[in-house]
Amino acid sequence: MNELKKVNVVKEEIETEKVITVRCDFCQKEFDKITVICKGYGQVKIKFGYGSKYDGDIFRGEICDDCFDDHFKGKLRIKRVD
């Protein structure tokens, strides 16, 4: 007859860091997770409403500071949200 052996289970927490690379959807410049938190990067969300040919569509993208300046700044009425 086989005997079961008593085993001590040790739980250990291991801290890991996962680097996530994101890319600007306009110029394809890459940023890692640490850079994204610090500077140079944001997200764009455009939601179309009733009557638009894109009614109900939501477009999302990643954008770097330079592309934001080139494509959006000064061209749209952008509301700052605090």
Image: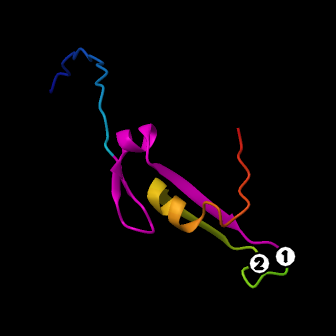
> In what quadrant of the picture does the C terminus appear?
top right
Residue at image x 69%, y 73%? 57
Residue nearer the viewer, 29 or 33: 29
Q: Earlier in the sequence, mark 1 or mark 2?
A: 1
Q: Return the residue at label 1.
A: 50
Could you tell me which secondary element the residue under label 1 belongs to?
loop
Q: Amino acid at mark 1?
A: Tyr
Q: Are marks 1 and 2 in contact (CB under 8 Å)?
A: yes
Which region is colored magenta? 20-49
Above or below 50: residue 17: above
Q: Position of residue 39 (x, y in %)?
A: 44, 42
Residue at image x 53%, y 60%? 68
Q: Would residue 79 be found to the left or right of residue 64 on screen?
A: right
Q: Position of residue 81 (x, y in %)?
A: 71, 43
Residue nearer the viewer, 58 or 4: 58
Q: Amino acid at mark 2?
A: Asp
> In what quadrant of the picture does the N terminus appear?
top left
Residue nearer the viewer, 14 or 60: 60
Residue nearer the viewer, 1 or 27: 27
Residue at image x 58%, y 59%? 44
Q: Position of residue 27 (x, y in %)?
A: 39, 68
Could you tell me which secondary element the residue under label 2 belongs to?
loop
Above or below 19: residue 30: below
**Residue 55 — which label?**
2
